Amino acid sequence: MKRSDFNKFKKTLYSPSIDAFVKSMCMADFFDGKEKILAIGDCFGREFDALEGLGKEVHILDLSPQERFKDFARFYQQSICEKTTFPDNYFDGVVMVEVIEHLFEDRAALLEINRILKPDGVLGITVPYFNGNQDFVEHHVRIHSHKTMRRLLESAGFKITQHFYRGFVSQLPMNKLLGVPFLYVPRKILKTFLGSRGLNFFYRFFFNLERFLGKFQWVQKRFSSYGAILKAEKCQLVDYDKIQVRDFSDRTSDFAR
């Protein structure tokens, strides 16, 4: 992202949290050069604020009514698991931040996204991964891993082109012992004495740190915010039903001998 774009971007953030910033900045990078973006399940408007601030044409689709967007012409209240009114190949990008784990019909949702996404379109997703600390949220109906996300996306005609694990930096705001000395105090000092330049350094440092640590699953898996941020693009759909039939039919033949 260009420095000038970054300065615009950080002013549009809905939340000052590092976790929110890392997710939103990744999406801004993923959608560089893309104009028409659909934000699915953006109930707090974070992705809308960030992407709209970069000059994108942002549409919002959510199952729940949103008071903030009740008069917004590009707000659509419905489930992405059902067919939408958008034409084929309509959007340059689709973003789902902490959404896919809430969907019972997740493959149906991805197939619909594939339909409305342009051939060179980009899908940006953030998702929690299972590490023993994530399976307590009642409205999470799936707990994923890198492998399950890869297979799910491939079954809907997507391939992962970028993937990194999140954990340490995303956990800091929720950790009082580490959050105060490593986040809140430095941020206040840098903002007080250096203004926007200080905030620029602060946010970029932690963003780059999370991206660097994202290469190491064994590090990020230790934290309750363990998950992934990934970019996917359209590809040939992988028919896992055929793979199952092929593999288990062959195995049955072996047993018959």
Image (spheres, grey):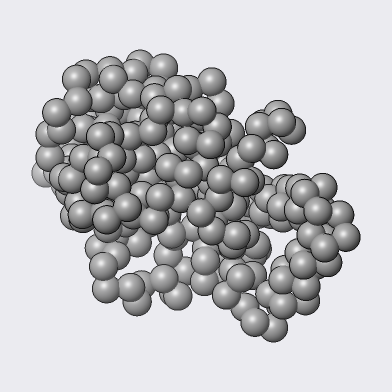
Is 145 positioned to the left or the right of 244 in the image?
right
Q: What quarter of the picture does the N terminus occupy?
A: top right
**Which residue lies at the image location 25% right of the left edge and 25% below the top edge?**
116
**Which residue lies at the image location 48% right of the left edge and 44% below the top edge?**
49
From what the image shows, is residue 59 above or below residue 25?
above
- Identify which residue, 127 or 248, lies in the foreground: 127
From what the image shows, is residue 58 above or below residue 130?
above
- Identify which residue, 198 or 225, lies in the foreground: 198
Q: Quadrant of residue 86?
A: top left
**Which residue lies at the image location 72% right of the left edge and 68% below the top edge?**
183
From what the image shows, is residue 9 above or below residue 174?
above
Q: What quarter of the picture does the C terminus occupy?
A: top left
Q: Position of residue 70 (x, y in %)?
A: 24, 48
- Identify which residue, 33 or 142, lies in the foreground: 33
Q: Position of residue 88 (x, y in %)?
A: 21, 18
- Identify which residue, 101 or 13, lies in the foreground: 13
Is 111 positioned to the left or the right of 98 in the image?
left
Q: Position of residue 224 (x, y in %)?
A: 52, 71
| Residue situated furthest front in the rendering | 71
**Which residue lies at the image location 43% right of the left edge and 59% below the top edge?**
128
| Residue situated furthest bottom in the rendering | 177
Q: Is residue 208 visible?
A: yes
Q: Quadrant of residue 251?
A: top left
In this rendering, the count of numbered labels is 0
Q: Position of residue 31 (x, y in %)?
A: 51, 29
Is 115 positioned to the left or the right of 56 in the image?
left
Q: Is residue 165 visible?
A: no
